[in-house]
């Protein structure tokens, strides 16, 4: 019924009609589900094959149908695999009857079936199962006892947790860790349910019990996260503890409020051994707050190299322009580890004022400048990608000292815009020193790869290609290929016929990212004198047809051209595989073209004709041209006649 139909009725009548329709729909869906469940239950109680019963259990699980519970309960006593499938289905049925079936079955099951049922009761958080599970904590079978503990931990009721706490100290050494882990799990569940006091009581109990150290520390960690009022003193206790406690404290501290953590950490820095102090400095750096800066600076001025390195790392995360001199001095030091860390921190200092300091120092550089300082400043300009440093860096790439010159070239590559690439290409053509060329080439590569405006880069490179000496042509052509631009394709189409570069350019075009290279590759596949390049071009052409988004009619035409030019069965088969994928995507049934029956030659032509016959009128011109090519290359008379007939039909349309 349309909205126009509803306008003939008043709003109340229309609402009543809609409600009635909804009831009908719901009733129909309910009836349909009931029928399906009845059929599934019948399968479970029949002699149906194992896989059919397995699928029935899976479907019942999806439906969550209480009506299937009795049949699933019966399967709990079947073979192990069906028993597993049945209890997994029972887990997912929300009706309490499913839980009661599992509880009732528990005393009658043994081995893996019993353990599975215990686990399922835990997954369901079946509170009615607690009285049946508690006695199993004392089972002589450690796996059963551990499974019961895990289930009680998941249930996390007051009765369940009390039983676990009572069993912890009495449990055997084999089972005790499972009971302790179950209590920690129960505490986490209680915490999620906003029962903080109960959760902390459990966690404190576990951490003071005779349990393995890793479990005791896990309880302490969980208590810190659960305790909203006293977590800081708990954290301080861990940080003053043994090596294991200290490591857990460092880890959990990163999940807590940074300012409050800093208040706990700063007072103990001076009181801890150097090795721990370095780890505390790393933590302070990770907190990301300025409050800790004085403490970190003090440690950075220590005579202990380990502390200095840790402090320098932290300064890179929380420092500002005020620590620039301290880090710069360390970067100039003769201690390689300290220098490397200081350079890294200088490169990551978040304060933008640092950029201003670097640019100002570079602008002031002259021939009297200390080379070591100048090299660090240039390196930082590049690593921090300071756009404002482009001016002084352009001046420094002509510096008399080679190290300064080369470092400036590398830095400039990370700073300049694509429109400034000619600054590098001009020097590539006429370098100050011959040894500058490899550095300039790598810099040009960096700019080309990171450029967003690839067309602009390609235009600069095209000019460079025209002016550069012959020995640079391969490099510039390769860079043009990296741009994958229309400008680069125009250059490739002209230079591909130069025998000196045909090998390079056909390799570049064969891996071109996009369909734009197809016309050039087709021309090379048709006209190149060297069969190696014809083959390479044809395979690149087929790659485009197979991998890129091309209109269906045009794709068929490309495959027809490939069949026409193929000199080997391998390329014919590549075309045939592409045609087969086209046919499958169009929903054309082709049983005779299975992979086992695939052949070359006329079989591929026949497949192409089937595709042509089933294509819609997308790109009809290319479709017609493709069929005409197929008519020319077919050797079988019947196939040739069929292609000619289709071509004539398409010509008339």
Image (tube, rainbow, N blue to C red):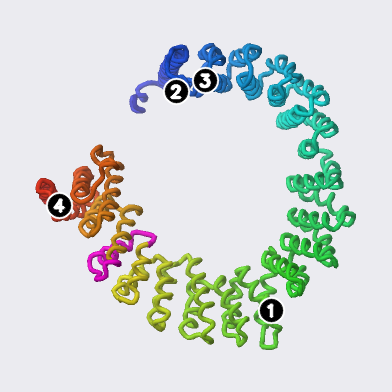
Q: Nearer the viewer, residue 168 or 155?
A: 168
Residue corresponding to mark 4: 634
At horizontal 60% and vertical 84% (from top left) the residue drawn is 402
Instruction: For mark 4, give the secondary structure.
Output: loop
Q: Is residue 528 magenta?
A: yes
The residue that label 2 is drawn on is 51
Tell me which label, 4 or 3, sits earlier in the chain: 3
Is residue 487 in view? no
Count residues near mark 3 (Cα–Cα under 10 Å), then give few for <14, some for 14-19, many for 20+.
Answer: many
Q: Nearer the viewer, mark 4 or mark 1?
A: 4
Decide: few, some or many residues near mark 4? Use Cα within 10 Å; few <14, some 14-19, many ≥20: many
Residue 361 has which mark? 1
Compared with 257, 306 (above or below) is below
Q: Secondary structure at mark 2?
A: helix
Q: In the displayed structure, does residue 359 sit left or right of residue 593?
A: right
Identify the residue under disc 3.
82
């Amino acid at each position: 019924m349309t909205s126009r139909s509803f306008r003939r009725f008043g709003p109340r009548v229309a609402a009543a009609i809609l409600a009635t329709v909804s009831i009908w729909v719901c009733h129909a869906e309910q009836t349909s589900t009931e029928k399906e469940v009845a059929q599934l239950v019948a399968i479970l109680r029949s002699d149906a094959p194992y896989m059919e019963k397995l699928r029935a259990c899976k479907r019942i699980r999806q439906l969550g149908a209480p009506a299937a519970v009795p049949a699933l309960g019966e399967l709990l006593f079947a073979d192990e695999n069906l028993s597993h499938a049945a209890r997994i289905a029972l887990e997912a049925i929300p009706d309490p009857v499913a839980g009661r079936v599992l509880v009732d079955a528990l005393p009658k099951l043994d081995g893996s079936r019993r353990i599975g049922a215990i686990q399922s009761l835990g997954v369901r958080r079946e509170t009615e199962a607690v009285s049946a599970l508690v006695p199993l904590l004392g089972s002589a079978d450690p796996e059963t006892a551990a499974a019961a503990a895990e289930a009680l931990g998941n249930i996390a009721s007051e009765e369940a947790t009390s039983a676990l706490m009572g069993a912890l100290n009495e449990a055997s050494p084999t089972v005790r860790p499972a009971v302790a882990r179950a209590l920690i799990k129960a505490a986490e569940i209680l915490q999620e349910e906003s029962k903080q006091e109960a959760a902390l009581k459990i966690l404190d109990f576990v951490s003071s019990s005779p349990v393995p150290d890793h479990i005791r520390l896990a309880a302490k960690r969980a208590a810190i996260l659960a305790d909203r009022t006293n977590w800081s003193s708990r954290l301080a206790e861990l940080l003053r503890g043994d090596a294991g406690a200290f490591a857990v404290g460092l880890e959990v501290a990163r999940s807590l409020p940074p300012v409050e953590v800093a208040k706990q950490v700063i007072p103990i820095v001076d009181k801890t051994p150097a090795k721990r102090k370095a780890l505390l400095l790393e933590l302070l750096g990770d907190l990301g707050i300025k409050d800790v800066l004085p403490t970190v600076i003090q440690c950075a001025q220590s005579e202990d190299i380990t502390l200095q390195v840790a402090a320098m790392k932290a300064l890179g995360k929380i420092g500002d322009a005020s620590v620039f001199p301290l880090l710069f001095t360390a970067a100039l030091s003769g201690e390689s580890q300290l220098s490397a860390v200081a350079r890294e921190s200088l490169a990551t200092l978040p304060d933008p004022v640092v950029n201003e300091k670097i640019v100002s120092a570079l602008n002031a550089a002259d021939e009297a400048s200390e080379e070591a300082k100048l090299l660090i400043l240039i390196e930082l300009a590049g690593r921090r990608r300071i756009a404002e440093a482009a001016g002084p860096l352009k001046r420094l790439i002509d510096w008399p000292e080679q190290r300064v010159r080369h470092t400036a070239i590398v830095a400039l590559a990370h700073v300049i815009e694509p429109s400034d690439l000619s600054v590098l290409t001009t020097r590539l053509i006429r370098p100050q020193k011959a040894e500058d060329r490899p550095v300039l080439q790598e810099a040009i590569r960096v700019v080309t790869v990171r450029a967003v405006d690839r067309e602009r880069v390609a235009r600069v490179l095209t000019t460079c290609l025209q002016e550069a000496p012959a020995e640079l042509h391969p490099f510039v052509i390769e860079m043009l290929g990296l741009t994958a631009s229309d400008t680069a394709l125009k250059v490739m189409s002209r230079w591909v016929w130069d025998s000196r570069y045909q090998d390079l350019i056909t390799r570049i075009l064969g891996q071109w990212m996009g369909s734009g290279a197809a016309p050039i590759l087709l021309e090379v596949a048709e006209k190149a004198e060297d069969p190696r390049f014809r083959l390479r071009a044809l395979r690149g052409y087929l790659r485009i047809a197979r991998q890129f988004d091309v209109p269906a009619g045009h794709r068929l035409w490309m495959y027809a051209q490939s069949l026409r030019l193929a000199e080997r069965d391998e390329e014919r088969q590549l075309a045939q595989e592409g045609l087969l994928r086209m046919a499958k995507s169009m929903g054309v049934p082709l049983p005779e073209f299975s992979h086992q029956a695939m052949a070359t030659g006329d079989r591929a032509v026949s497949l192409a004709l089937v595709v042509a016959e089933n294509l819609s009128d997308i790109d009809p011109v290319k479709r017609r041209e493709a069929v005409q090519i197929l008519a020319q290359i077919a050797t079988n008379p019947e196939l040739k006649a069929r292609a000619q007939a289709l071509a004539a039909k398409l010509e008339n349309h």
